[in-house]
Amino acid sequence: MVRIIVVRLRPIRLWYKLACAAAILFIVLLFLIPAMMADKNDIAKHYRYDKRVSSNGVELHTIETTPDHVGLQAIDTNVTATPFYGVNGGFFWEGALLSVAVVNGRPLKGEPGDYGSGWYNTGITNHLPRGTLVWDGSDRRFSVQIVTSADELAVRDKQQYWAQGGVSMSLGNEAVWRQEMIAQEMPGYDNGHMRTGLVYDSANRLYMIVSPTSCTVEQFRSAIVEQLGDRKLVDGIFLDGDGSSQLQTKQVRLAGDRRQVFQMLAVTK
């Protein structure tokens, strides 16, 4: 009799353990999922999403936010596969960051001065002066500075800024913007590609912009000036484009060509 009772209890014990494990998992998810949703909803309060189509047919998806709610992130996946709302960042090659990407004097990957860390703006063959969007948290102002490396940036406090490299958009300077963009070695500027850019206005509002339309740099820039011209835009930069042009918000996800990218700008709390 004793042996029979023992044998019959074994399946019951296994079932009991599985039931306990399932109950614990359910309780964890019960608390974790609302917390994750609340976090996403909190972040959504710090940006405004808009979709516009310009007269030249270029579609613009825009995240409007403030510089205090922007975080530069090193990633190794598609923007739409991250937990962040935001857009892709600067240029890269095989995981190495080829655009300045610095927060409070520290590059996103590695140490100051390291190749591929986000310390340098790098062109086709070597380091190259390129337009870099800088938020000076101490002075409370944006600027576009043409620099080769992060140690050239002019900010009041090296512990209160972020900087994102790209290629100068030169808003308000119609006479030279094209020469400047070519001199900074903007890839595929006269070819049709998806595009990404950052612009800011006189009230220090930042606009992260992605176009899934295949367009030239000039068409992309013209669409921005037309559609956001009433915002008193000051200046901006072009970021990496083509399949790297990616955006994620609560409202929409643009995955480019679904490729992996290695840096982004994210909306933060």
Image (tube, rainbow, N blue to C red):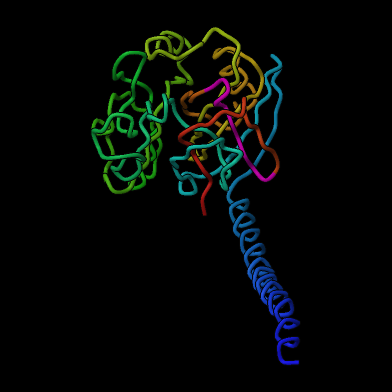
Residue at position x 62%, y 14% from top? 215
Q: Is residue 4 magenta?
A: no
Viewer-proximal residue among 122 and 26 = 26
| Image x and y of residue 183, in percent | 37, 10
242 over 150 or under it: above or below: above
| Residue farthest to the bottom, as pictured | 1
Can residue 223 be seen in this snapshot? yes
Expressed as whole percent of the image width and height from the top left, the position of residue 213 reads 66, 19
Q: Image check: 113 left or right of 251? A: left
Find residue 56 and report its image quarter: top right
Write the residue at 50% across / 31% down: 261
Q: Is residue 132 visible?
A: no
In the image, 145 versus 5, the foreground residue is: 5
Q: Which residues are magenta?
A: 241-250
246 falls in the magenta region: yes
- Vertical arrangement, residue 77 with respect to residue 17, above or below: above
- The vertical placement of 11 against 106, above or below, is below
Q: Is residue 96 above or below residue 73?
A: above
Report x, y in % for residue 7.
72, 81
Q: Residue at x 26, y 44 (%)?
A: 158
Tell me the quarter of the picture where residue 255 sits.
top right
**Which quadrant: the N terminus?**
bottom right
